[in-house]
Amino acid sequence: MSTEWTASLPESAAAYLEGRRLDEVECIISDLPGIARGKAVPASKFARQAYFHLPDSIFFQTITGEWGEAAGEEGFIERDMILKPDMTTASAAPWTGDWTLQVIHDAFDRHGDPIEYAPRNVLKRVVKLYEDQGWEPIVAPEMEFFIVARNLDPAKDIEPMMGRSGRPAAARQAYSMTAVDEFGPVIDDIYDFAEAQGFEIDGITQEGGAGQLEINLLHGDPVKLADEVFYFKRLIREAALRHDCFATFMAKPIANEPGSAMHIHHSVMDRETGRNIFSGPQGGETDAFYHFIGGLQTYLPAAVAVMAPYVNSYRRYVRDHAAPINLEWGRDNRTTGIRIPLSGSESRRVENRLAGMDCNPYLGIAASLACGYLGLMEERRPSKQFRGDAYEGEGDIPRVLGSALELWDEAEALHEVMGKDFARVYSIVKRAEYEEFLSVISPWEREHLLLNV
């Protein structure tokens, strides 16, 4: 560690390299789906460079690698962006064969302005709107995912992995420690990788699906937490591969099993006093608390296109499967799309249960905060608190991607908050993906329509 720039490394990255020679730095950035794009460079080269270039076209790609016609009036010329490292994000890549660091970069144009449709920039834009009001948004994401058997044939159903007992992971075993033990070696590597990267896990639990786990992260700054989810998806995949299985963050990977969510808990602090604006001096619920809920109820239908970004995402919204189908709000009620968890007044928070684990963490958190921000600024009032089983009512969220994108395209207030150019690019890329999906004939259609219609 002889180069000067290593002196600015976070404590965890410095500890990882102590007494060792850094070989390589992965310069990465999140694309729209949340895939890490970038370049791996020798450490000596990274020490000499203040930035590097990638074409802006990485944000126009669909999840299948095709392209949305989102380049704008100048055409598809693949203009270079300037990517600058945020050294506070420097983190170990402990699964690699040599001593490697990852560093998240931010994207700028040639004039030094942030690229508006870069996901991390979208989240920073929303956070700044809060800061301009003297507020500090706080979030805590929950990560649900499945550990499944290796699947090399897209035509084959996804199956649970084999546990230590030699039996497939069992379903309907929520919170079972025995079920968690079945994944012991994978979980051990997840903990080891997370520790090497400086991430603190608040807990790991077995969820209701076969091979489904949940990791809770401590609350904190939205950008920092989105960075951690971005990193966590990669480290969990790498931990699973070490044990001949896959980790998947699909919203609904296995039919008739629960889906995977990224529940987002929100609170907002007054930057001057450090107090939670959702709680008054005597600990009661404030107007701001209700306005935030009202903003979620008003704008989440359009924001669902960002929080549920794929056709598969909407398979998760199933009645009675601990997934939301509504925009009701209730206290300690997991049948409502907006839940108020049990807490003291200082930690009063609002949980958005609509976001799927398949969403880009920067965009999912940005969209959720944007809805709450608009509620605060417009002083939106929520509906009456729902009491009872909210699944008994009618669903009031989009049920297919096409409908969600129509609502997104009409949501001018959200576009203003998250960025008009982002809204334009996102819509074009997602519609291109939707058209790709509609061109595929499914096994269900061949089985039931081929000879019967």
Image (cartoon, rainbow, N blue to C red):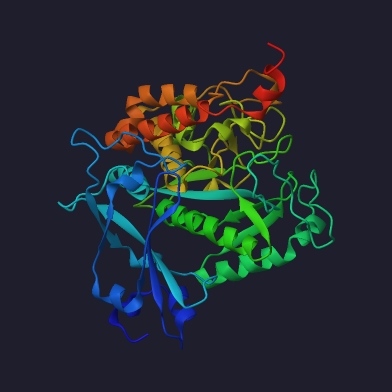
- The residue sitting at the left extreme is 111
Residue 176 image position (x, y, % from top left): 79, 53
Point 74% across, 49% down: residue: 160
Q: Where on the picture, by quarter, is residue 104? A: bottom left
- Position of residue 91 in the picture relative to residue 54 (left or right): right
Residues 282 and 162: in front is 162
Q: Where on the picture, by quarter, is residue 299? A: top left
Pick the quarter of the image with the C terminus: top right
Camera sees residue 127: no
- Position of residue 156 in the picture relative to residue 193 (left or right): right
- The residue sitting at the top extreme is 453
Residues 370 and 45: in front is 45
Residue 323 image position (x, y, % from top left): 64, 34
Residue 154 image position (x, y, % from top left): 63, 42
Residues 67 and 416: in front is 67
Point 59% across, 61% down: residue: 201
- Position of residue 154 in the picture relative to residue 164 (left or right): left
